[in-house]
Amino acid sequence: MVSAVAALLAAASVVGAAVPEPPPSRDAAEIQAMIDAAEPGAEIRPEPGRYRGRVLVDKPLILDGGGKVTIDAGGSGTVMVVRTNDATVRGLHLTGTGEDHNAEDSGIQVRGNNNVVKDNVIDDALFGIDLQQSYFNVIRRNRIASKPLDLGVRGDSIRLWYSDDNLIEDNEVKDSRDFVLWYAKRNTVRGNLSTGSRYGMHFMFAADNVVENNRFLNNSVGISMMYDEGDVVRNNVISHSVGATGTCLSLKEASNIVIEGNEILYCANGIFLDLSPFQPEAVNRISNNRIAFNDIAISFLNDWERNHFTGNRLTGNMTEVAVFGGGSAKRNLWDGNAWDGYEGFDRDGDGIGDTPHRVMGYAGRVWMDVPDTRFFKGTAILEVLDFLDRLAPFSEPELLLEDSRPVSAKRKEPA
């Protein structure tokens, strides 16, 4: 028995001795020296390990970490700056930026054109990937998380500033402040996941961008477009934007916007419009979206016009349409939408209701006219007041909108 125990102890000591120690930290100056010595177009593969410090890529080359190289700035400054054209940065773990918003401490700052930044992990970073006056870059399959700070003082996961014609594709960003495009044109944002942030995506003074096949989940606001023109938002899933500011999709003074084929689900506001479209004679086209299970499906800050709602499906929303501060939504086009609140018939079976769908506004809905009362929306007392007002209105209800060709609930979906 003693010999058996001794043998087990000996085996354990051998196993323990066989466990390799983690490699010691190295200096990022080693990587910098490799970059400085490389010819343009070279491929650099640093040895696996953790490197302390910061790196500048200032010539066209490939820097490949192979998924085994960490560069840690140690809580100071930006981890990597790409100040060149035609470089590729891939397979790196970039971490430990500073917390200086003025310096825009980032995992990667891109200051050039035709660069590729892909397959990197960026965490404990104030800003993730920051592009300024940079064009025709590809940002693909990166995983980005900010520092564990209060939401308002985190940095942005991906930010484009005066940067056009870039492809932002298949990235995963979480727990950052915003994913932003400011003064940016003709960018394609496709296949990304944005979650746990303030703005899943925030446009400002941007134009002609395409946002497609993304998922914006559990953000305070899914997509916000402010002072934009010509953007296309299609085939995205935008859901679970809740709370006082919870909105799936918000337009403020945004013109000639196309919103089509999206799933807009489980938000306090599905689509919110504020003075949109803003440009004279501009039209926003909102079509073929599924707007479901929201507190309010579609809301207007004011009595506005020139939004075309066609072919949308509104299902399971507590309120179909709201206009705050008085007025109606009649000056917009409503045609061929499917309303689960439609009470008419389709006697000829053509899939279109025989009578228009009308959404009425009642005087008792105080939460439309007094914004502070929205805190109580959904409570028993306000719902009872709404029900009683519809049952026996205190005054003549106002017509908010009319869809003259509502889709019948019995209409079959195309195969």
Image (cartoon, rainbow, N blue to C red):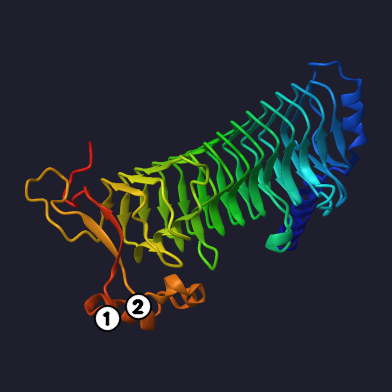
Q: Which image quarter holds the N terminus?
A: bottom right
In this view, 225 is above or below 207: below
Does dot 1 land on a helix, a strand or a loop?
A: helix
Say whether residue 354 is visible: yes
Residue 354 x, y percent position in the rendering: 13, 51
Q: Which residue is mark 1?
A: 388
Q: Amino acid at mark 2?
A: Gly
- How far apart, in angstroms, are the residues tagged by discs 2 and 1? 9 Å
Between residue 36 and residue 220, name the one nearer to us. Answer: 220
Q: Are marks 2 and 1 in contact (CB under 8 Å)?
A: yes
**Label 2 belongs to which residue?**
364
Say few, some or many: other residues with alpha carbon within 10 Å of mark 1 (under 14 / 14 to 19 / 20 or more): few
- Tell me if residue 131 comes above or below residue 277 in the rendering: above
Which corner quadrant of the image does residue 55 belong to?
top right
Closer to the camera in the image, 386 or 71: 386
* Helix, strand or loop status at disc 2: loop
